[in-house]
Amino acid sequence: MSVIETINKQDYYLIAEIGVNYYDIATKLGISNMEAAKLMVMEAKNAGIDAVKFQTYKASTLAAKNSPSYWDTSEEATTSQYELFKKFDSFGKAEYEELAKYSQSIGVDFLSTPFDYESADYLYDYMNEYKISSSDLSNLPFIEHMSKKGKQIILSTGASNLDEIQTAVDLIHRTNDVQLALLHCVLEYPTVYEHANLEKIVSLKKAFPECIIGYSDHTKPDACMDVIKMAYLYGAQIIEKHFTLDKTLPGNDHYHAMDPEDVKKIKEGLEFLKVLKGSGELTCLDSESAARMNARRSIVSNGDIKKGTVITRDMLTFKRPGTGISPSKIDAVIGKVAALDIEDDTILQSSMLVD
């Protein structure tokens, strides 16, 4: 199912970014990388995830050998991007094809972020959407290459200024007429809560009203998953977060990832928030109809009124329930004539009055 179809059905789309975390899971469990990757897909699916996402790259095409780290080295000790990526780049076309088919066979959407032209080309057949990393937001030739292929694009906007986002969006709109999604993201691993800046979601919605807006989260999971829930309340309809089966594993993206139990908390939280959000329609609810009638007021006689008496304002007051003439009709009642004797404290009805 596509992102748009899922959002139309349930109002959000939840992506588990497995990335390359399966390498460490394979080592921990003593199984192959492919077995670990499939295990993580299955665990994500069972937890309620809509899509799994990997990262497709080769270190040699992604980073120069002299490329410094930009992550918390107390969590991931490797100080060279090239050296880190080299540890996790063994999968190629055949492996991602196998993962895509496996994901689809168990009913979860498959995504993988391409980081070079070759992977962008061969991943085309396996995904409904292209996911573009924040790190490539200014890589306009690469964005154009994917955009021209006509698939929906999900673009993360971490570490970007508005003019840079606008340039990328304009390029995509010139070359692709499919729905574009923009994800607020903070390119800080991990993102401390004070830097989450979730109101950027609101800003993106205002700046790009034609786009689906989402959130790619790099904070450490909080106890109640409030970061994700707040992002949803601010309008994020695509939620992406790194995924692991063991948050205690050192390095890579385990230390700021959600696990299956976190996913369940997120799903429960989002479903509850959907109930609370409602439709936003400015109408009386069916469940309010009894209260509406009994808690509102009617025009009530303020003393006995004899038949034939012309009604004046001092003869009237307003009391519950609202089963008679509404106080909003007071001007239409004044000046009418009592059609019968009306006792004190009577809820007036139209049949009691004549012109």
Image: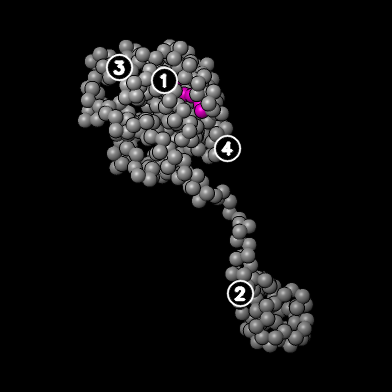
In three-dimensional space, the C-alpha distance between marks 1 and 3, rounded to whole angstroms, equals: 18 Å
Regarding mark 4 in the picture, which secondary structure is present there? helix
Residue 112 falls within the magenta-colored stretch: yes
Residue 320, disc: 2
The answer to whether residue 126 is above or below residue 1 is above
Mark 1 / mark 4, whichever is N-terminal: 4
Q: Marks 2 and 4, how far apart in space?
A: 42 Å
**Label 3 to label 4: alpha-carbon separation:** 39 Å
Residues 93 and 121: in front is: 93
Query: What's under tag 1, amino acid-wise?
Result: Glu
Circle 3 is placed at which residue position? 87
Marks 2,4: beta carbons within 8 A: no
Q: Look at the image and tell me in which quarter the C terminus lies.
A: bottom right
- Quarter of the image where one finds residue 23: top left
The residue singled out by tag 4 in the image is 9
| Mark 2: amino acid | Arg
Please report the bounds of the magenta region as a residue range: 108-114
Q: Quadrant of the N terminus?
A: top right
Q: Amino acid at mark 4?
A: Lys
